[in-house]
């Protein structure tokens, strides 16, 4: 898909819809080394921190993608049209440890513009990030008791902040 570069200050998306409604593929690793993994994510944020545009993603340490997030200094977030929802469901429910789930999903990994982590040819939005911060969630800091219901195995997420280096997308993501 042909994507245009979108300056960060012209990027437009409904923040809650883009996470919980659209979903992203979070991909970390190195495309050129064919060493990467991806997973579907529906929790995160986009904003400004330390005067930098950033994306915040969360990954449980039990996920295979966690290993790549720890080894590599970049990641991408890729969004897709609704016709790819089945692929995103598969990529969020199967582990890359058990086989080539990307091939099974029918998506085409491709090089990102600025970072080692790949994106996908079918994406209609790509956000490329360099990691700038991480922290493990601490359940003792949850202020609403029901948050802990998301962690029956006590496998609390690691939070990663990525500085946004590039955004490419179709015209629907450009502020009018």
Image: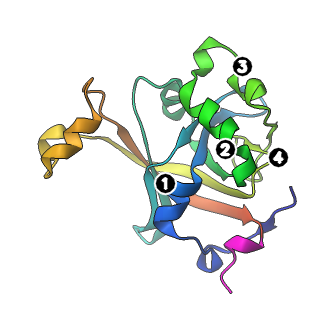
Sequence-wise first label, 1 or 2: 1
Judging by the rendered image, the residue that carries numbered circle 4 is 121
Label 1 – label 2 distance at C-alpha? 12 Å
Query: Is residue 173 inside the magenta stretch?
Result: yes
Where is 67 relative to 138, above or below? Answer: above
Contact, mark 1 vs mark 2 (Cβ under 8 Å): no
Residue 93 visible, this angle:
yes
Q: Earlier in the sequence, mark 4 or mark 3?
A: 3
Q: Describe the element under mark 3 as helix, strand or loop.
A: loop
Residue 13 location (% of width, % of height): 58, 71
Instruction: Point out the frontmost of discs 4 and 1.
Output: 1
- Whether pointer 3 and pointer 2 mark residues with C-beta atoms closer than 8 Å, the reply is no
Classify residue 81 as left or right of residue 15. Answer: right
Contact flag, marks 4 and 1 (Cβ < 8 Å):
no
123 relative position to 26: left or right: right
* Label 4 Cα neighbours within 10 Å, binned few <14 / some 14-19 / many ≥20: some
Q: What's the CA distance linking mark 4 and mark 1? A: 22 Å
Residue 35 % position (x, y):
69, 25
Seen in the picture, residue 43 relative to 90 is either above or below; the reply is below
- Quadrant location of the C terminus in the rendered image: bottom right
Q: Position of residue 37 (x, y in %)?
A: 63, 29
Q: Residue at x 82, y 46 (%)?
A: 121
Name the residue at the bottom extreme: 176
What's the CA distance linking mark 4 and mark 3? 17 Å
Q: Residue at x 49, y 48 (%)?
A: 42
Q: Label 3, label 2: how many angstroms apart (C-alpha)?
A: 18 Å
Question: How many other residues sit within 10 Å of disc 1, few (<14), some (14-19) or many (≥20)?
Answer: few
Tell me the tag on residue 20: 1
Q: Is residue 89 left or right of residue 58?
A: right
Query: What residue does disc 2 label?
Result: 85
């Amino acid at each position: 898909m042909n994507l245009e570069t979108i300056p960060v200050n012209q990027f437009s998306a409904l923040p809650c819809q883009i996470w919980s409604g659209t979903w992203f593929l979070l991909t970390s690793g190195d495309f050129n080394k064919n060493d990467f993994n991806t997973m579907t994510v529906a929790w995160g944020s986009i904003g400004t921190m330390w005067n930098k545009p950033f994306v915040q993603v969360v990954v449980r340490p039990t996920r295979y993608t966690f290993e790549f997030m720890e080894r590599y200094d970049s990641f991408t977030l890729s969004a897709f049209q609704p016709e790819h929802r089945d692929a995103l469901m598969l990529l969020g429910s199967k582990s890359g440890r058990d086989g080539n789930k990307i091939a099974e999903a029918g998506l085409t990994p491709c090089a990102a513009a600025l970072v080692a982590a790949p994106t996908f040819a079918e994406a209609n939005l790509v956000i490329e990030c360099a990691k700038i911060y991480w922290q493990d969630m601490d359940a003792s800091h949850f202020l609403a008791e029901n948050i802990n219901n998301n962690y029956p195995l006590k496998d609390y997420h690691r939070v990663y902040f990525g500085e946004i280096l590039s955004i490419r997308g179709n015209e629907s993501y450009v502020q009018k």
